[in-house]
Image (cartoon, rainbow, N blue to C red):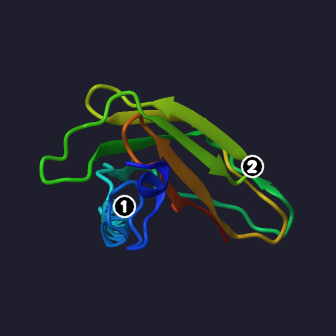
Amino acid sequence: MNIRSLRRDEAGDILGIPMYLIIIMIVAVAVIASVIYMIPKGTRTMAVQVTNNALLAESYSGGAAFNFSSTYTIWVKVTTNDERQDPIYGATVTLVGSGDAGQAKTLTNGSAKITGIKPHLDANINEAHMVLTVKAAGYDDYSDPEAVTVIRLG
């Protein structure tokens, strides 16, 4: 056998393998890669609910900036988003907006207590929202831009 026959012959074979088999293998690999890419990822999602103080309202008349007179405690419940609704322990819960922010970790029952929230509304703003974000290992991040509503009454 000479070197010429190992590299390419007159029939289009490369290293003794017919060219059409090489093309079929390349196409098969591309198809398999496409199918694997389209398979949905097994990400887990959370169900998050503000269970206490989702609406904060105080009376104030006038158009000047307004600091709420009370501090509030916000309770958040974090569970798996499936039929079992198991509590998620150790998730970081963050609440930001209306001039204040707070953070807490969920307990074994999935609840988090964010304390010391004292909203502030700028002049001529009567309503605002606080953004709730939750992060937990093994789960998609959760965000609700209107989790807590802050209202100036009057």
Q: Is residue 150 above or below residue 46?
A: below
The front one of 61 and 87 is 87
Q: What kind of element bears circle 2?
A: loop
Q: Earlier in the sequence, mark 2 or mark 1?
A: 1
In front: label 2 or label 1: 1
Residue 29 quadrant? bottom left
- Measuring from the top left, give residue 81's x and y in whole percent: 25, 53
Disc 1 marks which amino acid?
Ala
Q: Which mark is residue 33?
A: 1
- Measuring from the top left, give residue 46's x and y in whole percent: 33, 49
Residue at the location (46% across, 62% down)? 8
Disc 2 marks which amino acid?
Gly
Mark 2 lies on residue: 99
Q: Is residue 117 visible?
A: no
State left or right for residue 140 relative to residue 41: right
- Measuring from the top left, give residue 1's x and y in whole percent: 37, 48
Q: Is residue 36 above or below residue 12?
A: above
Q: What kind of element bears circle 1?
A: helix
Residue 150 quadrant? bottom right
The C terminus lies in which quarter of the figure?
bottom right
> Could you tell me how many numbered marks the image carries?
2
Residue farthest to the front, as pictured: 1
